[in-house]
Amino acid sequence: MLKVIAENSQHKYIEILVDGDINKDSVAALLSLMQQRISEWGEVNILEEVRDIGKVELAAFWKDLRFGIKNMDKFPRAAIVTDIHWVKNISNFLDPIVSMDIEVFARKDIERARNWLSGIEPAPPSPTPEDLPPSP
């Protein structure tokens, strides 16, 4: 499931919940909303709470990748909120490669992630493996 759970127009961010399988229809709906917000706000920051990732349809992955590459300069910041080790590792790997600033937060720190996106507090250091619960 890929679902927008909140929007903050003042600080120009969208909160997305990832919990289970991701299909092309859910990605298409999300990208449509993001395109609308880019048109309205000029840029969009993202808070992505990742609880679980199941199967990802190839068409969904491809659609998301194309949109992201085309609009890379419209996404200044991404806060990834997760307790899943491999998601944290991929996010940290991508941070120096992509133009957006990516910070990873433990799920217990979701409010800190919102504050970071809003510019209220500086980014904390990325969680270490000791900060995250063990992988199943």
Image (tube, rainbow, N blue to C red):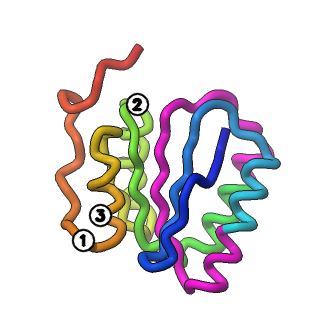
Residue drawn at x 68%, y 29% is: 55
Residue drawn at x 70%, y 47% is: 61
Question: Is there CB contact under 8 Å for labels 1 and 3?
Answer: yes
Query: x, y (%) of residue 17?
Result: 55, 45
| Left or right, residue 110 beside residue 38 | left
- Please give the count of numbered marks on the rendered protein: 3
Residue 29 in magenta stretch: no
Query: x, y (%) of residue 74?
Result: 54, 77
Q: Earlier in the sequence, mark 3 or mark 2?
A: 2
Q: Determine whether 42 is above or below 82 in the image.
A: below
Residue drawn at x 54%, y 65% is: 7
Residue bearing mark 1 = 120
| Left or right, residue 76 beside residue 67 | left
Secondary structure of residue under mark 1? loop
Residue bounds of the magenta highlight: 34-62
Q: Determine whether 15 is above or below 59 in the image.
A: below
Q: Earlier in the sequence, mark 2 or mark 1?
A: 2
Residue bearing mark 2 = 84
Q: Quadrant of the N terminus?
A: top right
Residue drawn at x 57%, y 41% is: 18
Q: Determine whether 18 is above or below 132 in the image.
A: below
Q: Nearer the viewer, mark 2 or mark 1?
A: 1
Where residue 31 sits, quadrant-wise, is bottom right
Secondary structure of residue under mark 2? loop
Residue bearing mark 3 = 115
**Label 3: how many residues lie within 10 Å, few (<14), some (14-19) or many (20+)?**
some
Q: Quadrant of the C terminus?
A: top left
